[in-house]
Image (cartoon, rainbow, N blue to C red):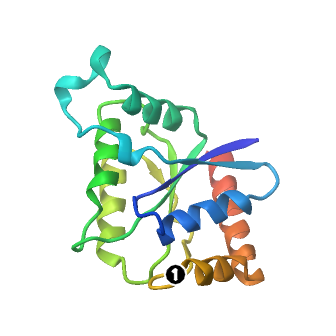
């Protein structure tokens, strides 16, 4: 069983990115389990003086979750042409650790407009030595949709199949490494 960790880069209650990672967890193919990390909003601001024995509990939980996952999935909104601060803060807590080194990662998208954040996030994660899966991406356009519309779109058979196929391809990528 592959254990995949899904992270939404949004802290909004009605986040389309969070809805997408939740749908991925519900639609995981056989042989995959998707667990959602929901602690970005509880992380203290990264401070290198707080690493090692002084690492805060919430940061340690994130580091452990990434360390023990077989792969990481990130769905990230774009704010001011960049990666939201909460997600960047979470990634900063991983920088000096081995958790990200050679860890398979896949980016998924809830908006066709997040091109700047996609490029920035891919650059950040490659710099951190994540093994970024480039074998195709999953994009389900949810931007501007109300929660009931989002759930309806995510339940469409074509989108369920797209999610399962994307996760299966990512799982194959992980298994062949």
Q: Quadrant of residue 10?
A: bottom left
Q: Is residue 120 above or below residue 125?
A: below
Q: Nearer the viewer, residue 137 or 142?
A: 142
Of helix, strand and loop, which one carries label 1?
Answer: loop
Q: Residue at x 35, y 37 (%)?
A: 94
Q: Is residue 33 visible?
A: yes
Asked whether 135 or 110 is in front, the reply is 110
Q: Is residue 1 left or right of residue 79?
A: right
Report crowding for label 1: few under 14, some 14 to 19, many 20 or more residues within 10 A (C-alpha): many
> From this viewpoint, which residue is outermost toward the right?
30
Query: How many marks do you count on the picture?
Result: 1
Percent x, y of residue 116:
29, 74
Q: Residue shown at 69%/79% (left/top)?
A: 159
Q: Residue at x 52, y 81 (%)?
A: 142
The residue closer to the viewer here, 155 or 107, is 155
Q: For the C terminus, which image quadrant? A: top right
Question: Quarter holding the N terminus?
Answer: top right
Q: Which residue is mark 1?
A: 142
**How far from the left and from the top, in percent, is residue 131?**
47, 49
Q: Is residue 108 shown to the viewer in this render?
A: no
Q: Is residue 90 above or below residue 16?
A: above
**As drawn, is 73 to the left or to the right of 25?**
left
Residue 40 appears at what percent x and percent y?
A: 39, 47
Instruction: Estimate the x, y position of residue 112 in percent, counting from the top left.
Output: 44, 83
Q: Give the residue at x 51% y 85%.
A: 145
Farthest-out residue, top? 53
């Amino acid at each position: 069983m592959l254990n995949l960790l899904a992270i939404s880069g949004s802290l909004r209650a009605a986040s389309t990115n969070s809805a997408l990672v939740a749908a991925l967890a519900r639609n995981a193919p056989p042989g995959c389990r998707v667990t959602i990390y929901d602690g970005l909003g509880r992380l203290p601001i990264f401070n290198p003086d707080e690493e090692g024995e002084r690492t805060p509990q919430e940061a340690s939980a994130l580091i452990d979750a990434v360390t023990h996952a077989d792969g990481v999935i990130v769905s990230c909104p774009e704010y001011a042409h960049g990666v939201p601060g909460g997600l960047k803060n979470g990634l900063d807590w991983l920088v000096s650790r081995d958790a990200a080194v050679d860890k398979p990662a896949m980016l998924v998208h809830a908006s066709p407009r997040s091109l700047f954040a996609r490029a920035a996030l891919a650059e950040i994660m490659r710099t951190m030595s994540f093994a970024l899966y480039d074998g195709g991406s999953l994009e389900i356009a949810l931007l501007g949709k109300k929660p009931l519309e989002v759930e309806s779109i995510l339940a469409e058979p074509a989108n369920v199949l797209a999610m399962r196929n994307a996760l299966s391809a990512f799982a194959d990528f992980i298994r062949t490494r």
